[in-house]
Image (cartoon, coloured by chain):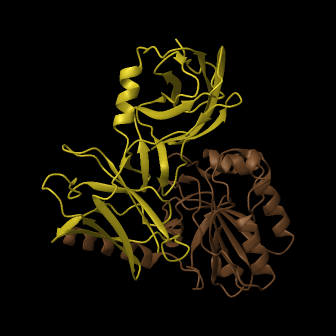
Amino acid sequence: MKSITNTLLGVLALFTAHAAEIGQPAPAFTARNLKGEAVSLADFKGKVVVLEWVNFGCPFVKKHYASGNMPKLQEAYAAKDVVWLTINSAAEGKQGYHEPAKMAEEATKQGNKASHFLMDTDGKVGKAYDAKVTPHMFIIDKEGKLAYDGAIDSKATTDAADVATADKLFVNALDAVLAGKEVSDAKNKPYGCGVKY
Amino acid sequence: MAGCLSTAAARPGKATVEWLASSATVEPGKPMQTAIRMVIDDGWHTYWINPGEAGMPTTVEWKLPPGWQTGGLVFPEPARFLTSGLAGFGYEGTVLFPVTLTPPADFTGKARLTAVVSWLACGESGCVPGEAEIHLDLAAGAASPTAEVAAISAAYQKLPRPAGNALRLTVAESGKNLLLSITMEPMEPGAAPDPGGREAFPATPEVAEPRAVIRFSKTGNTWTSEVPKSGYAAGPARRLTLVLAGGEAHGPLELTWSAP
């Protein structure tokens, strides 16, 4: 019994060793956007970067796109010089995956206004950050350190009406990072559908 | 029949729900057993009060006439499952959620009770939200058993029972792990349920890591288990409720610890 527990703890320790930690340098990555161009985190050195994991078929993602919430945030923060990367880590053939041309159509239809939409089909970026669900939000500060890992907001529901009344966990964190202030709730449990690696 | 099936569900959600009553007539001021029966499509599951790493627990918005009381939806013992590599707790197939209703002491005539049930069904191909409005039509009178009374009674019987004084849970921190201990009050052999070998499910979210299976092993008079803390624990654990799975000799048990 104890050896099973130790193995399990060992496996979990191994898993978390690869995951990004708040206050630590955010893991480097390169992925292709929908135009096939290689995009690297290093390209945005000195800027605040947002990572948003997406799956347009997920009801929790639909809540934030149908309500216009996510596109509105993408636009508002682009105006503040934030680099916003929307990432899809679904493996080919799994729910949430579309090949790039189809994904571009879907992104346009949903009103996505990210700086880049990255295809992470082999899941490398997702696993480097331990992206678990969609939406799962990360913020990287100007020094390249991970400043936020968590939910878009406080109401873990699929109801678009809840967007207006939820605590804006991600927005509060992003505003703090932009103001150079400490993020008070830097890591919390994101809600959404599991990423289909 | 007193209950009714949701016909035009607001959102189908891979499951149907129905409100079952143990009696079509109810005595004023007296609690009555009912149950919400959820039948989930094959390959899908819905979630427990602690859904695990993802998912969303089933909730109910009650629309009851004035003076009616309910203890709310009660969750039976869950099962553990893994979906897209994420650990979750919940239900598959058919599940009955007991709901106790108490009419006002001056109840006469008829009443229509409404429940709007919301849930999330997930499977390997994704997640689908569900919502349905269901009703119960009851009349004042002496209780008279319906065809559903046996199923409802069985659902109540199978609910986790508080372990009371027989088993006491304590929780201590050990770095990134929690040390769970269950002490058994010395008593007649066989009188205390044996926690060994059965899985314990954490009903309190964000205390224990959902991927870790909680099982106890015995040292002397104490059962212990060491499990990783949830990555989202806001600080030291303040409270933890565990549901110990039922076994051959005993039904499921509920153990609660609160920080002193």
Provide residue A15's location: percent of width, then percent of height.
Answer: 40, 72
Residue A82 visible in this rendered orientation of the protein: yes
Residue drawn at x 72%, y 73% as measured from the top left? A173
Letter of the chain in yellow: B
Q: Is B253 displayed left or right of B114 in the figure?
A: left
Q: Quadrant of the N terminus of chain A?
A: bottom left
Residue A93 visible in this rendered orientation of the protein: no
Residue A145 position by quadrant? bottom right
Please tell me whether residue A175 is drawn above or below residue B209 in the rendered image.
below
Letter of the chain in brown: A
Q: Is A100 displayed left or right of B41 in the figure?
A: right
Q: Residue furthest bottom?
A: A143
Please tell me whether residue A42 is drawn above or below residue A133 in the rendered image.
below
Residue drawn at x 44%, y 64% as measured from the top left? B240
Q: Residue furthest left?
A: B189
Provide residue A196's location: percent of width, then percent of height.
Answer: 49, 53
Q: Residue furthest front?
A: B106
Provide residue B184's location: percent of width, then percent of height.
Answer: 23, 63
Residue in the foreground of this view, choosing between A2 and B32: B32
Please tell me whether residue B171 is drawn above or below residue B49 in the rendered image.
below
Please tell me whether residue B19 is drawn above or below residue B238 in the rendered image.
above
Number of marks drawn: 0
Provide residue B117's location: percent of width, then percent of height.
Answer: 60, 34
Residue in the foreground of this view, choosing between B185 and A11: B185
Residue in the foreground of this view, choosing between B44 and B185: B185
Q: Residue furthest top?
A: B1
Q: Is B218 displayed left or right of B166 in the figure?
A: left
Residue in the foreground of this view, choosing between B93 and A133: B93
